[in-house]
Amino acid sequence: MLLKKLTEAMGPSGYEDEIRQVIYEEVRAYADRIFTDSLGNLLVEKNGSKPGPKVLLCAHMDEVSLMVVHIEDNGLLKFRPIGGVDPRVLVAKPVRIGENKIFGVIGSKAVHLQTQSEREKPISMDQMYIDIGAKNREGAEKAVKPGDCAVFATEYQEIGDRRAKSKSFDDRVGCAVLIETLKKTFEIPVVFAFTVQEEIGLRGAGPVAFRVNPDLALILEGTICFDVVGAPGHGMGTVMGKGPALSVIDSSTIANRDFLDHMIQVAESSSIPYQLRRVSGGGNDAGRIHNARGGILTGAVSVPTRYIHAPSQMISLDDYENTVRLVEAFLRSVERGGLCSQ
């Protein structure tokens, strides 16, 4: 299954080689042109059957991860985060390290050994390590080295009422939407960009936008869910099962009103459920793309994702499938002259 293949592949920010190859194998048969730029972004061009506005569809390949920075004398590995990783979700989680996918477990001082004051505070990343079962430094160095990256070892599984759990739905779910869309035929030229290093500052998206210079851009993402105990939603948060989320505002973008209204009209006319993402935290590749060159008309659609940036994330398969439907309906509307003619 596509989601399983994408989410279980490794792709830390700056080390997207494996996930890029997985995507390449999935899409190369459908491309008019396919290439990787100097940063590692994978671009897939489909020329269309007639001239028209050029549309850029974008999803990032990279995932939050950890990097080994030091090997202790006893063989334990010290690490640092790549991207926004909450230390509170790390203890006792299994990981895979480096090209050989060495298995390890994130450890810390057992609660029995902690002082009373230590027990009252969350464990910091400095107090953690990765244990690969090595007896000493020399044994560990045979398997890993500083600079190797670790990703969570979570496997894809469908559970409950059409839910799926895995690592890296942020943003492999967006990559999956792009791949499903790429397999369809459109009259207009469309460029599908699978970008790098989004989790460490949206670094891949700017060069992509400059190179492609599209008339329109649509970003596909995973986004936070507020339907959990204690979340401060106030009726404004995205939830699982109510459809793709259309961005109104985030930390790097204020939605173009014409684009947002058009996406709402497309969803409603196609009977596709949708919701609005109205909180200002977080951001995505739209933050770099919309202000490239002289400015690019840009929107963002996200699949609500519980426990985002955590070892096990969860999505609704209905939301995923409805996002695929919405993206195709959007492109069909552009074929008919929508949005660009406004």
Image (cartoon, rainbow, N blue to C red):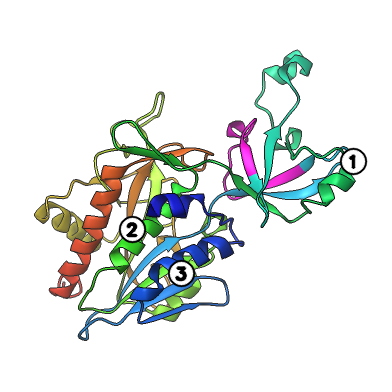
Reading the image, the residue beneath label 3 is 24
Residue pointed to by mark 2: 177
The kind of residue tagged 3 is: Tyr
> Residue flagged by tag 2: what amino acid is it?
Val
Could you tell me how far apart the alpha carbons at marks 3 and 2 are, in whole angstroms? 15 Å
Q: Position of residue 268 (x, y in %)?
A: 12, 52
> In the rendered image of this protein, does residue 188 appear above or below residue 26?
below
Horizontal and vertical percent for residue 173? Answer: 39, 52
Residue 82 vs residue 35, the one in the foreground: 35
Numbered disc in front, either 3 or 1: 3
* Mark 2 residue element: helix
- Relative to residue 62, is residue 118 depicted above or below? above
Q: Residue at x 56, y 62 (%)?
A: 18
Q: Quadrant of residue 211?
A: bottom left
- Taking the image as shown, residue 72 lies to the left or right of residue 202, namely right
Neighbour tally class for label 3: few under 14, some 14-19, many 20 plus, Cα within 10 Å: many
Q: CA gap, disc 3 to disc 1? A: 41 Å
- Residue 73 bears which disc, if any? 1
Quadrant including the C terminus: bottom left
Few, some or many residues within 10 Å of mark 2 (<14, 14–19, 20+): many
138 on left or right of 322: right
Work out whether mark 3 precedes mark 1 in sequence or the reverse, and give the earlier one: 3
Q: Is residue 86 highlighted in magenta?
A: yes
Q: Which residues are magenta?
A: 78-95
Report how far apart the C-alphas of labels 2 and 1 lie in the structure. 46 Å
SS type, badge 1: loop
The kind of secondary structure element at disc 3 is: helix
